[in-house]
Image (tube, rainbow, N blue to C red):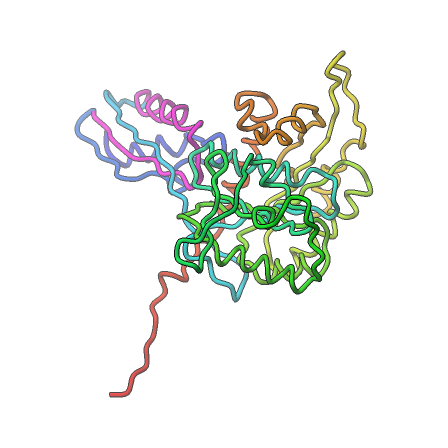
Amino acid sequence: MSPDRVTELLKSLIDPNTGKDLVSMRSVRNVKVDGGNVSLDIELGYPAASQIDGLRSAVIKALRAGGAANVSANVTSKIVAHAVQRGLKVLPNVKNIIAVSSGKGGVGKSTVAVNLALALAAEGARVGMLDADIYGPSQPTMLGISGKPESVDGRLLEPLMGHGIQAISIGMLIDADQPMVWRGPMVTQALQQLLMQTNWQDVDYLVVDMPPGTGDIQLTLSQQVPVTGAVVVTTPQDIALVDAKKGFKMFEKVGVPIFGLVENMAIHVCSKCGHQEHIFGEGGAARMSAEYGVPVLGSLPLDLRIREQTDSGRPTVVAEPDSDIAQAYKAIARKVAIAIAEKGKDMSLKMPTIKVSNT
């Protein structure tokens, strides 16, 4: 068997998560052939701890069926920084920023954001959470975090840890019952400080739980924060969809790509009798997807357990990692990570610097 034969066989092997073959994804590395012995590396551009064993088995099976006697396949993930809005630079210790947004409040945006972050971490990524909802910070409660962040150098805040992810929120710096009576410029400045003056530790994905709405604060943040892409959360209800469309337009205006739409509270299943009912309507996300040409990343149910788990500081992905709901969150997280992996890479740190000096 030759290296070309190995490549030919791998062209027919489809990654079920991306729908593409490993060769066109440029995931195949270090192919070595010694008679009937084949060794190679598969490097994925997205975190996939739960998928690695299955993919490794598929590679070994395909090459053995093609004539290899022994196959050694090493499957890993490598997360790199990807391009952001024109004129902005990627943060030094944060590779990718995912904005989770909604056109209006009450659609479960923060719950989706925290489970998305925890799902990415469960797949092996280093994840941070920035709670950008100054007026209604909820991530400390959802992540079960108490206490206040410290500063080692007197300049940067150390993020607090919750279920393995780094997190910062204005809710960690004020009393729980203290209202934030700030105007827009103060809110924007505070969020910039939380983002830039937190000592993030080599974060692959920073999930930003955006304030609800599409006003001046959200627009300014979208223009000033180097965002890799956005996820828009809505319910099937017509009123929510109208506001979600405004969120789409806002991100389009500032050049932030939209990875897709998450339809929350899509269906309610009665915990007593199992009766299913579309309380907030049906098919809204699909219609919006067709109108704007963006995918529906997933649909999530209106379920009592989700509310109880986030209120207790143990969101679904942590509380019931093998449940159907947790698997839905993880599937959404993989789709977002793959969409990021398929974007252009950030090359700003590789560009040469030009220095002019008098000689």
Of 6 and 355, which appears nearest the observer? Answer: 355
Nearer to me, 57 or 199: 199
How far from the left and from the top, in percent, is residue 230?
A: 60, 48
The picture places residue 11, in percent across and down from the top left corner, at 39, 34
Q: Is residue 215 left or right of residue 297?
A: right
Residue at the (52%, 66%) spot, across then down:
87
Residue 143 lies in quadrant: top right
Question: Which quadrant: the N terminus?
Answer: top left
x and y, in percent, of residue 8 in the image: 34, 34
Side (left or right) of 36 relative to 230: left
Which residue range is magenta in the image? Answer: 37-65
Image quadrant assignment for residue 85: bottom right
Residue placed furthest toward the bottom: 359
Q: Is residue 96 above or below residue 275?
A: below
* Residue found 77% across the figure and 43% down from its top: 241
Position of 69 compared to 17: left or right? Answer: left
For image coordinates 49% across by 33% down, the residue present is 163
Give the total number of marks visible in the rendering: 0
Asked where in the image residue 323 lies, by quadrant, the reply is top right
Specify whether residue 41 is painted magenta: yes
Which image quadrant: the C terminus?
A: bottom left
Q: Residue furthest top?
A: 273
Q: Nearer the viewer, residue 69 or 219?
A: 219
Q: Per the image, is 214 magenta?
A: no
Query: Residue 21 appears at what percent x and percent y?
Result: 43, 35
